[in-house]
Image (tube, coloured by chain):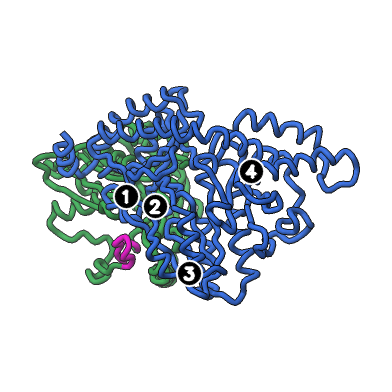
Chain colours: A green, B blue
Amino acid sequence: MWDYTEEVLDHYRNPRNVGKIDNADAIGEAGSLACGDALKIYLKIENGIVVDAKFQTFGCGSAVASSSMMTEMIIGKPIEEVRKLTNKDIADALGGLPPEKMHCSVMGHEALEDALKNYFNEEITLNDLNSETENKIVCTCFNVTEQQIIEAIKVNNLKTVEDVTNYTKAGGACGRCKGTIQQIINDYLNNEAKEKAEKPKLSSAQKILKINKVIENQIAPELQKDGGDIELVDIDDNKVYVKLHGRCSQCRNSVLTLKSFVEQTLRDAIDKDIEVINIEQ
Amino acid sequence: MNNKMIYLDNNATTKVDKKVVDEMMPYFEEEYANPSSMYDFSKKASKAIKESREMMKEFFNAKTSNEIIFTSCGSESANTAIRGLLETEKNKKHIITTKVEHPCVLNVFKYYEKQGYKVDYIGVNSNGELDLAELQEKVDKDTALVATMWANNETGVIFPVQKISEIVKSKNPETKLFVDAVQVAGKIDIDVQTANIDMLGVSGHKFHAPKGVGALYVKSGTLLNPLIIGGHQERGKRAGTENVPYIVGIAKAAELAKESLKYEATEIKRLRDKLETNIVKNICNAKLNTSISNRVPNTTNIGFEYIEGELILLHLSDIGICASSGSACTSGSLEPSHVLRAMGTPFTALHGSIRFSLSRFTTEEEIDYVIEKLPPIIEKLNNISPYQDEINALKNLKH
């Protein structure tokens, strides 16, 4: 028996936004009947805002819960924000999924990405990788591409072949691609280490100034749009102490905001080891 | 959630019969002696083992009680038989089993395949019946062992072991036959002499004994090296102090099972048939994964097309119904049931297959409850499925 969280139980028992939108502006699909899970998502987009989203899912409890939660997370959100959503955000909002079920959140995110691609009629690639990598199938049993594996490694900080299988299903059937997956992980980690070595190390004073600047110019304005705000309290090496104000402080998604938005923005801009800590009011 | 609990997963494990528990109890606190000891105090324990062995002899219709070895479970029975035999038979490097075995046999064969053995895995047809022609073709002078289940745990399909034995022995009288009888014990009659079987294993907890005890029949004259090496217990074929209360338990369970065989064949079968007939009749995308009559009377395996098994189980569990699924999602592996795949079950139904398995404790009221509660659950899940057109087509087809 899986140890599902209350959120997962609630969403598979009472899935939100089930069905289709007849005149949808974007439709996305992921998975297949043969693979054992498939998802279709329908979006209604007006003035750059997702005004409605519906889904149909063939899959297990966590697949339905991931789909349902995802529609709740994107309805009412500007498309630019929706584009930033990751599978990790979906899993976090569900209070976590068992490791073997993480691929359900990945599938949800893939369907969303597919819908957005279809909406913009363009290729959205989060990495600067050429299309050859993007389309190269690594796992033929489950049709998983190299791009999907790299994306999962990046977003979820995966380290082992088993992790990759849990998150993408790749390598979960015949297992012949496990060597290739290991190679992809090694290449990714090597690249990451190289980039880290190349990045000039900031002095403490420079780092503090830069963190302050990113919070002021990039993070605070976004939170203010939603009626919230953020205050920088202290910085201790890579630990950044903040206080959330206004609507953010009461929002039940505040942990999500803090980790996936504030922390991720600082990590992308300055240092991937930065940890953001909320000081409760 | 409600308080009702309807247990229809008896091929996974069963409730221990109260009469079995009662029989076992004295051997924990009162008659706890080691049966091998020399004092009078151990007499009752050693007598209990002797009587239990006699009971298992009856249960299998073995020739003598010396042919019975007590083990800890079905997997140990299978491992002892297969590995114990191959240890004594080092010259022949060919072994045969089926594609639909339980992992405790299948993975042992895969292990020997890696060790350099030539292994043939015999297939089944879409009803789950073994391909006897293929078996006949594969047995040759190098075949040391054929291992087959008597009935399949997922579908309940019974394999004709007597016929299998005839085929094997006619091609090579030296080839030994191991039968995994875990899923027939307590459901149909076992007769190792009529069926001409060399070795046969069962597991107590599948027929209302506790978990942690099994039995293995080894025909007199069959050479077998012990899997567990140590003392002289079980005539040197399985070391370790006898688990007296559990051995008493499996014997009592065997006695009760033998008494209720007729009830299984008539009443349990009637309830199973009622369950599957009504489900298939009332639910547009339900179909039996195998419908042949030659199945153990307690098992049905039903495919619900275009919806996924774990989701069905979770919703059933929410209203107190316990069943199981061959879907990938329930096991933590990413592949659906190897049994249904070997049968070529179409992938539209493969991931949505549910097994219901009854026992002599199942009541008609419980079956009626499932018949009543299942259709609205499936209807709800059908509405979530992306394959609306396909489901509607099935709906029109049935009406």
Residue at mark 4 = B58
Q: Which residue is mark 3?
A: B171
**Which residues are the magenta region?**
A138-149
Circles 3 and 2 on the same chain: yes
Query: Please, what secondary structure does the residue beneath circle 3 have?
Result: helix
- Name the kind of residue labelled 4 in the image: Glu
- Within 10 Å of disc 2 (Cα), the crowding (few <14, some 14-19, many 20+) is many
Say if mark 2 contacts mark 4, CB within 8 Å: no
Label 3 – label 4 distance at C-alpha: 30 Å
Q: Residue at x 39, y 64 (%)?
A: A174
Q: Which residue is mark 2?
A: B337
Q: Residues within 10 Å of mark 3 (few under 14, many from 20)?
A: some
Asked if A4 appears above or below A116 in the picture, the reply is above
Instruction: State the image coordinates of residue B160 (x, y, percent, origin top left).
Output: 44, 53
Q: Nearer the viewer, mark 3 or mark 1?
A: 3
Within 10 Å of disc 1 (Cα), the crowding (few <14, some 14-19, many 20+) is many
Foreground disc of the pair 3, 2: 3
**First along the sequence among labels 1 and 2:** 2
Chain letter of the residue carrying label 1: B
Chain letter of the residue carrying label 4: B
